[in-house]
Image (tube, rainbow, N blue to C red):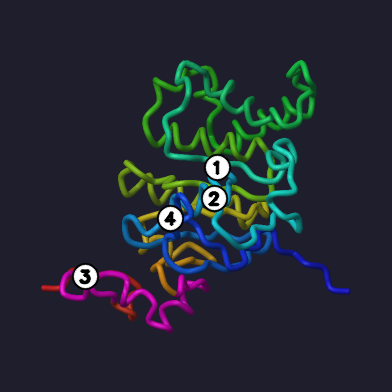
Amino acid sequence: METNHNILEVQNLTIGYDQVPLGGAISFNLEKGTLCAIVGVNGIGKSTLLRTLGNLQPKISGEIILVGKPQESLSPNDRARLLSLVLTEPMASKNLTVSEVLTLGRQPYTNWLGQLSDADKEAVANSLSRFDLNDLAERKCFELSDGQLQRVLIARAMTQDTPLILLDEPTAHLDLYHKVQIFKLLQQLAHQHQKTIVFTTHEIDLAIQLCDKILLLDGKTNAFASPCELIEKGSFSTLFPSEMVRFDEKTGTFKVSK
């Protein structure tokens, strides 16, 4: 029998608030080691979808399956071992040091006293090194730039060591250089460390260049495919009003209509 390698399976999922759906049903599957962006116009439901996938708000209908297990069947601790979340909400306390924030990522694995094992300490040390944070380890988070703090939050998710990582707008408020840096970092985590990463973004041009899959929320068909397949289908061409912005299929970028 062939093994199912899907880390995340979404089947006919309807999202929204108070049983009022935001657009049509959403279906897609993601295998291990895949980088996937969720894109779409403002208000279409990108963050709502991410929060629903992370079990922070209820779905209206459909199925969410994490590593072969229905989302609703998972205990909070089981869920914390399967997925980690990086949201846009401010940190509860920026008075923590970088090392302390990364240590929080080991909470699903510590004993009832919260004591760190040697394996936990090694995971924190590895993330500090992997994300080039050793020089910042004892700095308080309020002392960090936006780009540094975003790197710390992604490192915390990596320290949690889950197969699935969900991020909401990880490049918000960053300049172009740091946007690309975060995108490349996510790509490295997916391809070299075999993490399945799903993130919302407005940086569609960068997502087309660097992502393996894109989910294009339009409230109707909600197309899901590789960037090349979506370009071939003309999916990006109808995303924005053509009198203002048009999609150039040859370059894979959006152009301002003159």
User: Alpha carbon of mark 1 to alpha carbon of mark 3: how far?
Assistant: 34 Å
User: Which label's residue is closer to the chain start, 2 or 3?
Assistant: 2
- Badge 2 density bin: few <14, some 14–19, many ≥20, Cα 10 Å: some
User: Alpha carbon of mark 3 to alpha carbon of mark 4: how far?
Assistant: 20 Å
Residue that badge 3 annotates: 245
Amino acid carrying label 3: it is Val
View extreme (front): residue: 19
Q: Quadrant of residue 41?
A: bottom left
Amino acid carrying label 4: it is Lys
Amino acid carrying label 1: it is Leu
**Residue shown at 21% from the left, 70% from the top:** 245
Q: Quadrant of the C terminus?
A: bottom left
**In x, y percent, where is residue 12?**
58, 68
Tell me, for residue 52, which label it has, or none.
Answer: 2
View extreme (left): residue: 258
Horizontal placement of 26 versus 144: left or right? right
**Magenta-drawn segment:** 221-247
Tag 3–tag 4 contact (CB < 8 Å) = no
**In x, y percent, where is residue 47?**
44, 50
**Residue shown at 61% from the left, 42% from the top:** 84
User: Alpha carbon of mark 1 to alpha carbon of mark 2: how far?
Assistant: 6 Å
- Of residues 51 and 85, the one drawn nearer to the viewer in this rendering: 51
Residue that badge 1 annotates: 56
User: Alpha carbon of mark 4 to alpha carbon of mark 2: how far?
Assistant: 10 Å
User: Which label's residue is closer to the chain start, 1 or 3?
Assistant: 1
Tell me, for residue 46, which label it has, or none.
Answer: 4
Amino acid carrying label 2: it is Thr
Q: Residue 169, relative to residue 204: is it above or below?
A: above
**Residue shown at 76% from the left, 18% from the top:** 115
Looking at the rendered image, the disc whose residue lies closer to the viewer, 1 or 4, is 1
